[in-house]
Structure formats: structure tokens, C-alpha cells
Amino acid sequence: MTGIVRLFLALALVGPPLGAQTLSPDAAGQGLSIVQPQVLDLTANDEPIITVDLTHQAADLWDRIRRGFAMPDLDSEEVATQQIRYLSHPNALRSLFERSYRYLYHIVDALERRGLPTELALLPMVESGFNPMALSSSRAAGLWQFIPSTGRYFKLDQNEWVDERRDIVASTEAALDYLERIYDMHGDWHLALASYNWGEGAVARARKKNEAAGLPTELAYLKLPDETRRYVPKLLALKNIIARPELFNIELPHVPNRLYFETVESPPGIDLAMAAAFAQLPLEELVALNPAFRRPVIPEGRQQLILPADRVDLFQSKLAGAGPRWQTYRLGNSESVESVAGKFGLTLTELLQVNGLTSPFNLKSGTVLLVPAGADVQSVMPLTNLIPDLPSAKEISTQAPKKKKSKRRNKKRR
């Protein structure tokens, strides 16, 4: 039987770079225009058969992911279009793959424990570009882009200290719980993925509408929003590229098939800058592994800190003699925030920044503030550029707001 292998070669690379540092759920691959791609048909005697030798240990994590591919392919022009869009920007595609290295092993491990297709490990590439700080216009956050209500449904804490929609471990478990649920609902991975993007209720209604009209209810036959219509093809385009990178002249960055990070219990009252110093890590790396923290200080209660596996022993040895370096302070009656800042050797701006506040006004008595108890405040200030919930100095206003003049209205006398 004669088979056709179609290779799409983009002749023009036009459009903004794919995979910017902060991506919305639909941003990966948007904004690119393809000028008249060529279609090269190569005729072979037989369709190429991709085989995987499961008797040998995976060479790297990409190889391990390939072994777990289990979703049916989707033969559509949209998949080919999405492949072109990714391949037309090789530097951006490489950056997308490189950003995933911290998190992929954990996600693949979680998928295999549940017996789920490893294609799902690529979903954060589509959702967030593997940026755990990604925040969409609909307030969806984290690698898996949970909106606040869905995050609460899956018991992801969202408070003044943490946002577990950004937590690598918690959000991954919640996302896989959700994906399993919507797969059980539809019995089809393409429909489950469309539900993840559009909502399971919306997909169910679209299927019922087709069924009532005597039409097929598979994904290809449903009337979908443009974003959802492109969503599954984006994932499958990435799957195709990773399955046979040599076919597309792509070299995947090496990702070892070994544990990258571990979780450790960390006591409250130490800040992230101190934790980074104990583990001898750049502050940016510690935040990338612990993006759920909304304040620079680890809060009270049992808190897990994520560290590279090879830094855990070093961190714990340094932690043994460390005590709390921060404490909470309750604002008293008629007490100004400025006076509290002076009491603890801070500027007003510094006190507001570490507490995620943009103004000292209208704070009620009893408000709990975070203050140092021997901490090096300057060491935590770089966190204001790394944690999106902390305001920059430019965002803080210490000037009292002007009172609006009341306009008297002339009342007509009857």
C-alpha cells in the first residue's frame, strides 16, 4: 500500500516570537503568518512504522515520554498548520523546551503512576509555555492555568500567603484529577482536552447538538470556538515534533531521565532569600521551583519547599541552626504604618513591598503586617521583581489621596 509523507516547509518566518516569557493559555503559537508554505509529497512503498524498544532504559526524558504516547493521532490540516507555526520559530521552540526541564520529570512520573498518556506532559507548553507565573486575562494561573473557581474546587489554596494554582506539585495533581474526570465523562482524549480548554459542559452541549442533528460527535465534527479548534492540534503538533525531531531537523535539549527536585519541610519565619542562600541557589531558580509563594517569607504551618535534589542535604545542614527571622505585627489603634516601619528599621516603601501593599492608607487597626526579626531586609528586595504579587517601588503611593470635593445640588422648591 502506497503511503504519502507530507513535509510542510515554511518559506517565510513572519510574526512575533512564539513562547514569550509570560504566556496566556492561547498565546503559544499565535500571531504568526505563514506565507504560501510548500507541500512536498514523498512517496514510499509503505507507511513509516515508528517502533520503541521497551527492553532498554530510556536514553533521556524525551525518550521516556515517547514510550508513553497513547493518544490517537489527529490527521488534519490544523495539526500541520500548528507544526509550521512552531517550526517557523526554532529559537522560540527551543526556549519552550528548555523552560520545561525543571518540571517535566515530575509530571511524567505522575502520569505514569496513574497510567495516563504521556502526551499530557506537553499540555503546559500549550497552556502556559511552562511559565509557572503565567496569568491570563481570565485570571487563570500557573503551569496548568486554573481559574480561581476551578482551583478552589480542586482544593488549591489561594490566600494572602500562597496561590497553589502556581504550586508545581499541587497544581499537577489537580490538573491530572481534572483530566481523568473529563476523560471518564467523554471516553475520548481529544474531547477531554477540548473540555479542559472550553469547559466540559460546553463540549457536552456541542455533542448533544450534533447528536440531535444526526451528526457525528467526534471532535472534528463539533462547532468549536477558534481557540478550542486550535487547542488539540497544538498539542498533537508538539507530539509529532518530539516523536521524530530528526524529521523536522530539530535537536531537542538534553533532559536527563532522573529526579530533578525534591520537597522538604521548611520552618516558618525564614525568607526565600535565606533559603536560596542555604541551598546555594540563584534566587531566580528557587522562585521558579516555588512559584506559589505570594510573600517573601515562608508562612506559619507546615510548608513544603521544593529544591533541586542535589541541594537538599546542603539546605538541611544549614537549616539546622537557623531560627525564625521574620514575625507578624498587629497594627494598633491610631497607629500609622509609617511608625511601624520606623520601629523595625524599614522605610515605608520596604514595609509595604514585603506585605504586598501599594498604599499605607485605609488599613484598619488589627491588620497583620510582616516585619523583620533579625532578617536582612535588603536581601529579600530582589523578590519584588520575581514574585508578581509583590509591588515594585514605582507601584507604591505614599501620598494621601486627595479628597474629592462634594458637589452641592440645588434642590427645586415646590
Image (cartoon, helix red, strand yellow):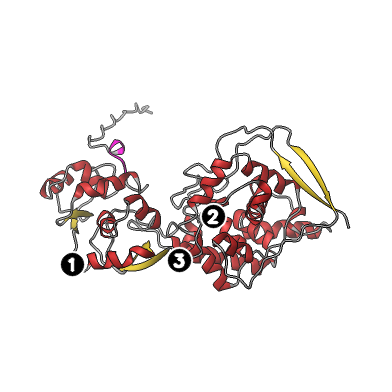
**Which residue is labeled 2 in the image?**
124
The image shows residue 398 at horizontal and vertical percentages of 23, 37
Asked whether, in this view, residue 146 is left or right of residue 398, the answer is right
Residue drawn at (49%, 61%) of the image = 256
Q: Nearer the viewer, residue 100 or 361?
A: 100
Q: Please, is residue 404 above or below residue 234 in the view? A: above
Residue type beneath disc 3: Leu
Residue type beneath disc 2: Pro
The segment highlighted magenta reads: 391-395
SS class, disc 3: loop
Mark 3 or 1: in front is: 3
The image shows residue 118 at horizontal and vertical percentages of 60, 64
**Which residue is labeled 1 in the image?**
321
Asked whether, in this view, residue 407 is left or right of residue 341, the answer is right
Q: Earlier in the sequence, mark 2 or mark 1?
A: 2
Q: Nearer the viewer, residue 378 or 101?
A: 101
Task: Please say whether residue 24 is visible from this viewpoint.
Answer: no
SS class, disc 1: loop
